Amino acid sequence: MSVPILAMAWPARSSSNKKQTMKILLIALASLLLTGCATGIYQWGGYDALLYQSYKNPEKTLEFRQGLELHITKMEALKQKIAPGLYAELGTLYLQAGDATKAVAMYNKERDAWPESRGLMDALINNVGKRASEKSEVKS
């Protein structure tokens, strides 16, 4: 004789309790299935692979920067929110390449998109400004 698994798991209950328990189980199962199918909140555009490659081979830093530029441009065109940290990462890449103006622009975008980053972005912007003024003083 075959006994359903759920019937063995619970002692005898009234039919309304069984129905309520089944509803809860079905909702829980549906939630698990839907959660498992969910995709990430943000589109990262291969960020992790590009970052790894640039660390592994510093000659690929330009490729990393271009990949971030392309991804950010695409997401902005689609009016999608840029993943946290991508503007700042691109800004740092610009700064490393010697383009402080573009770096500050990206830090400002990061600060505006992610208010919780305001303190860090303000500090980076101030440091870039200080470096620029120190360089101009040395030249004078």
Image (tube, rainbow, N blue to C red):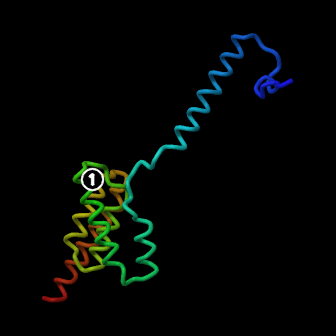
Q: Which residue is drawn at 31% across and 50% down?
A: 81
Query: Given the image, on which type of amino acid does mark 1 rest?
Result: Asp
The answer to which image quadrant residue 74 occupies is bottom left
Q: Which residue lies furthest to the bottom in this view?
A: 139
Q: Which residue is drawn at 36% across and 61% down?
A: 45
Residue 28 place in picture, x, y as percent: 61, 31
Q: Does 57 appear above or below 106?
A: below
Residue 24 place in picture, x, y as percent: 63, 24
Q: Which residue lies furthest to the front in this view?
A: 1
In the image, 125 versus 84, the foreground residue is 84
Q: In this view, does 109 lie to the left or right of 21?
A: left
Q: Does 107 appear above or below 23?
A: below
Q: Which residue lies furthest to the right in this view?
A: 1
Q: Is residue 21 left or right of residue 88?
A: right
Residue 47 place in picture, x, y as percent: 40, 65
Quarter holding the C terminus?
bottom left
In the image, 119 versus 13, the foreground residue is 13
Q: Residue at x 67, y 22 (%)?
A: 22
The answer to which image quadrant residue 99 occupies is bottom left
Q: How many labels does the image show?
A: 1
How crowded is the residue under tag 1: few (<14 C-alpha within 10 Å), some, or many (20+)?
few
In the image, 99 versus 50, the foreground residue is 50
Residue labelled with disc 1 = 112
The answer to which image quadrant residue 95 occupies is bottom left
Q: Does 13 appear above or below 90?
A: above
Q: Does 135 appear above or below 88?
A: below
Q: Residue at x 21, y 84 (%)?
A: 135
